[in-house]
């Protein structure tokens, strides 16, 4: 009798749809920051045997795990920020840099300092090749009002999101190219700008006197 119950229980578990086990999954996403600059000498792949991502210039890597509770293939995103362009690439595994796993065991938690500066020149005079990546240390929601400067375009925020603001010419005190990255469970957006961010009527990130520690991975809750 006991054996029959065990068999029935096993069959019952076998035929339960996977979503029943996923109810506690995907409650958040994890955003990981690699604390060192990638260079063209580095080799970056999606998993140990997956696709390779070409690194043509100094690059800041952000890896987004869209289902951090899963231990098999699932959707991930690679955000590669460099002076010439910002790329978003899809993945299925964890990053492997120079044959070493990144962010795999969850033990690599640390504080990244924002802004993360990427000087491109080796002298003292600015060359226009510098780059500064600013990360807001808390998530935004649909009640927040994010704007490019006081008079420029308004960015709509529909889901809980992380803001990364990239200053493409940190030494400039006038209108110049910037980029806004908004990361959420529903997707990643890149918006062009020409000013500093204003959040709910206040200037943020630009010109901050003190660096801010950003915990990596940064968790973004799923919008209800």
Image (tube, rainbow, N blue to C red):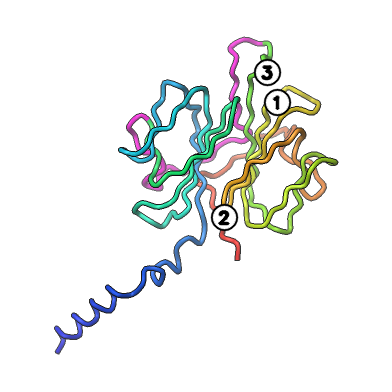
Residue 165 part of the magenta segment: no
| Residue tagged 3 | 128
Asked whether 202 or 4 is in front, the reply is 4
Left or right relative to 6: residue 84: right
> Which sits in the foreground, 11 or 123?
11
Q: Secondary structure at mark 1?
A: loop
Q: Residue furthest bottom?
A: 1
Measure the C-alpha gap from mark 2 to mark 3.
34 Å
Q: Which residues are magenta?
A: 98-124
Q: Quadrant of residue 5?
A: bottom left
Q: Is residue 55 above or below residue 25?
A: above
Instruction: Determine which of the numbered discs, if any, sits on residue 170 in the image.
Output: 1
Relative image position of residue 77 (x, y in whole percent): 48, 44
Label 2 neighbour load within 10 Å: few <14, some 14-19, many 20+: few
Please say whether residue 109 is one of the residues in the magenta stretch.
Answer: yes
Tell me the residue at 72%/52% (across/down): 156
Q: Mark 3 or mark 1, which is nearer to you?
A: 3
Work out whether mark 3 precedes mark 1 in sequence or the reverse, and give the earlier one.
3
Q: Which residue is at a point 37% across and 36% down the rendered structure image?
A: 51
Q: Position of residue 219 (x, y in %)?
A: 54, 52
């Amino acid at each position: 009798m006991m054996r029959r119950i065990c068999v029935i229980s096993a069959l019952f578990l076998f035929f339960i749809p996977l979503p029943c086990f996923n109810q506690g999954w995907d409650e958040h996403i994890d955003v990981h920051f690699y604390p060192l600059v990638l260079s063209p000498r580095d080799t970056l792949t999606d998993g140990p045997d997956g696709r390779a991502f070409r690194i043509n210039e100094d690059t800041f890597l952000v890896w987004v795990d869209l289902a951090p509770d899963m231990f098999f293939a699932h959707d991930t995103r690679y955000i590669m920020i460099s002076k010439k362009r910002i790329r978003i690439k899809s993945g299925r595994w964890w990053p492997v840099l120079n044959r070493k796993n990144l962010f795999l065991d969850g033990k690599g938690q640390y504080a990244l300092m924002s802004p993360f500066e990427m000087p491109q020149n080796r002298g003292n005079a600015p060359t226009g090749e510098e780059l500064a990546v600013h990360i807001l240390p808390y998530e935004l929601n649909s009640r927040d009002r994010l704007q490019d400067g006081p008079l420029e375009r308004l960015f709509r925020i529909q889901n809980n999101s992380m803001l990364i603001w990239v200053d493409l010419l940190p030494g400039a005190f006038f209108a110049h190219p910037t980029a806004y990255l908004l990361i959420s469970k529903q997707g990643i957006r890149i918006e062009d700008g020409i000013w500093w961010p204003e959040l709910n009527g206040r200037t943020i990130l630009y010109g901050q006197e003190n660096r801010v520690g950003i915990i990596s991975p940064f968790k973004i809750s799923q919008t209800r």
